[in-house]
Image (cartoon, rainbow, N blue to C red):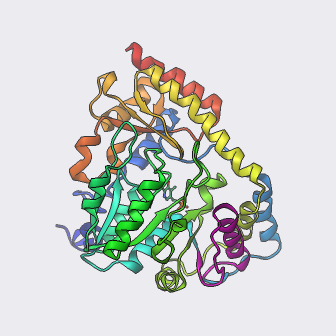
Amino acid sequence: MTISGAWQRTARGAGLLAADGSVAASIFAEMSALAARTGAINLGQGFPDEDGPAVVLEAARQAISDGVNQYPPGRGQPILLEAIARHQQRFYGLTLDAGSEILATAGATEALAATILALIEPGDEVVTFEPFYDAYGGLIGLGGGIHRTVPLRAPDFQPDLDALRDAVTDRTRLIIVNDPHNPTGAVFPRETLELIVELANQHNALVVTDEVYEHLTFGAPHIPIATLPGAWERTVTISSGGKTFSLTGWKVGWLSAPAAIVTAILAVKQFLTYVNAAPFQPAIAVGLGLPDAYFDGIAADMKAKRDVLAPGLRAAGFEISVPQGSYFIVADATPLGFTDGTELCRKLPGLAGVVAVPIAAFCSPGNRAEYAPLVRFAYCKKEPLLEQASAQLAALSRS
Ligand SMILES: *Cc1c(COP(=O)(O)O)cnc(C)c1O
């Protein structure tokens, strides 16, 4: 190992660097670069191609003009914390103390980072479902935790409940639950969420939820785990304004939990970012207070987008699982003769002028083979673009 390589200890130990010293898990960057280079339609990364509500954008401009530009309080601006409390009450009947039970963060990502780093010790086990949002694996590694996964399998990507029971033991410190789920679009039914709470109680584990797609479900309304009996005391609920307001670049997120847990997380958060971008906080507070029509509208719009891309992918010859929430569709390329989704994603710009990402990028190394033929397409894009992508993908079934 080179001298500089020898200094890469923690990043290497946590599996964040590839053997050649480059940043691992760079498939997202590789695919976005491929889209930029080839001009292909980028259905790889999950960001919308339209900005969020005009009143929210205007509120940020106004905040800058009004001089909301210096360090805000570490927990977040009271106006945002109170808006989050009202949102949790209005949608879920959860009564929170804005001053002690809520923390504003730099996106859901910092909420996850501070939570995991605050709540695990080296050697603790953390259970997630698989495929999983890539940050979970990296953060568990940075915290010295051991990552155990419960597989989600096509066609519906629901967990086998016995496998879930087997994964949670007295060594489990955290169970991370992303519902609605990225990348599969699965929404867990109440029974599954109840079992998670039961197992957490039985084994004295904490539940960490990632609910960034809470307002993007297409059937049954979203159920926050914290609302279930026996859950609140041991649950950290995480969300973000990025997906709900189509403002992924603003990175305003938050978490809520019992005060003592929030304090532990704040102790870590203060040394990650100290505080978060001041003018965006009152603006997201405006968003959280928008009328029900806004929240119903984004779910209906996203469902309509899904219903453009899903038949397009089927017509192209993929086998798909129809998502019940989120921004994404998982497509199986096996019927098209591809068994390696990573290879397909590298070829897809040339074959059809479209970019996707392989599901293997959301899996631990040992389990990538099982998910190899699957790829993820994002449909959080304008409908004409999704129609064009569908038309281009039709070339696959002709070749
Ligand atoms: C987008 C996303 C995040 C990151 O949210 P930010 O607010 O941008 O940090 C976290 N979890 C999941 C499942 C996501 O899809």
Residue 145: where, in percent of width, then height? Answer: 28, 72
The answer to which of 303 and 38 lies nearer the viewer is 303
Whether residue 54 is situated above or below residue 254 in the rendered picture: above
Farthest left residue in view: 1
Quarter of the rendering containing residue 105: bottom right
Residue 390: where, in percent of width, then height? Answer: 53, 25
Residue drawn at (32%, 45%) of the image: 360
The answer to which of 231 and 288 lies nearer the viewer is 231
Residue drawn at (24%, 69%) of the image: 13
The answer to which of 67 and 91 lies nearer the viewer is 91
Residue drawn at (48%, 86%) of the image: 267
- Residue 328 makes an appearance in the image: yes
Total labels: the figure holds 0
Quarter of the rendering containing residue 59: bottom right
Quarter of the figure that contains the C terminus = top left
Residue drawn at (45%, 57%) of the image: 178
Quarter of the figure that contains the N terminus = bottom left
Whether residue 79 is situated above or below residue 59 in the rendered picture: below
Quarter of the rendering containing residue 33: top left
Q: Which residues are magenta?
A: 75-103
Q: For this view, does 65 lie left or right of residue 354?
A: right
Residue 65: where, in percent of width, then height? Answer: 82, 70
- Residue 52 makes an appearance in the image: no
Q: Residue 77: say if magenta.
A: yes
Residue 103: where, in percent of width, then height? Answer: 58, 77
